[in-house]
Image (cartoon, grey):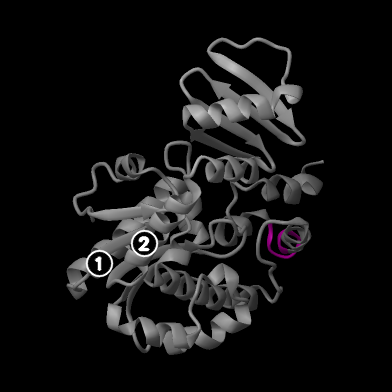
Amino acid sequence: MANVVLKVSEQTREKMIKYYEDKKRDKVIPYVVFQAQDLDTVITMYESGKVMFQGVSADVDADMWREIDGQSKIDKVKLKKEEEKYYYSSSVGSDEVGTGDYFGPIIVTSAYVRKDQIELIESIGIKDSKKLDDNKILKIAPELIKHIKYKSLIMTNQEYNDKYSDSYNINKIKAIMHNKVLFRMINEENPEYDYIIVDEFAREQRYYEYLSGNPAIQRGITFMTKAEDKNLAVACASVISRYIFLKEFEKLSDSLHIPLPKGAGKDVDSIGKEVVNQYGKDKLKEIAKINFKNTERILDIFIH
């Protein structure tokens, strides 16, 4: 479900009132000019001049009015320039993998890419690791690490389970790990960079709140959504993190003599039960993230 808010001109507001005339809802809402439903999108126009679109196709409907209002073309040009600024730069980026996998560690990597390396990095085939299959990552990551500086941090599931609590949640864990690899990169390698970029998993203020009390905090970070698509340093960090994760995951599977599945789906539950049958339920504390719902489903047959 998307939720998009626009501020449009008075002229466009009048067009919208006419357009949605036969789609308006009857209910009266304070400070609302009208509320209408067009297929699966609910449109709410406020007296303030803002219009909210809610629903599966909210972004499509909002884009239509953005273009009518004359915003679309300008915004796209501005957005492209902004994204190019971050892409064609010397930068340090960080990204993590493993937080959504029941088995396997969490890996966070910071990578440094100089502007004059961009063409080389692209020729290797680097992009967001989520868009590359594991076989491709296993092939290109060794080539990548020959050319760039990077710092990685591995958190085992035993460490994760020891730390995780209501006050020490996954975002705090990620913030601490990102901060460590970024601080190490900047202070150990002393790179010349234009930007430090992190894929936004928490608002900037909240991110630094997670680091409260830490004596070594890396500041000057630019937080952005889908950063791995907009910056090669983050993309490289994503690929290297995934590569290390795959290698660690393979070691874990070999040590158990059980092929572990990735993710947190139903196949994870069945293999988890096999692990418990062979090694006992305490083994999960070493190899899995026990706060996941999978643990309840895995142990259910042993509780009843």
The answer, for residue 107, to whether it is visible in the render is: no
**Circle 1 — which element?**
helix
Crowding near pointer 2: few (<14 within 10 Å), some, many (20+)?
A: few
Q: Quadrant of the C terminus?
A: top right
Was residue 278 drawn as part of the magenta stretch in this picture? yes
Tell me the chief SS of the magenta region: helix
Relative placement, left or right, of 255 versus 224 is right
| Pointer 1 with pointer 2, Cβ within 8 A | no
- Looking at the figure, which quarter contains the N terminus? top right
Q: Which residue is at 47% across, 45% downward? A: 71
C-alpha separation, residue under disc 1 versus residue under disc 2: 31 Å
In the displayed structure, does residue 256 sit left or right of residue 66? right
Residue range in magenta is 275-280
> Can you see residue 173?
yes
Asked where in the image residue 182 lies, by quadrant, the reply is bottom left
Secondary structure beneath disc 2? Answer: helix
Q: Which residue is mark 1?
A: 184
Which residue corresponds to mark 2?
Answer: 81
Query: Which one is in front in this view, the residue at disc 1 or the one at disc 2?
Result: 2
Residue at the (29%, 69%) spot, across then down = 91
Task: Name which residue lies at 51% across and 77% down.
Answer: 243
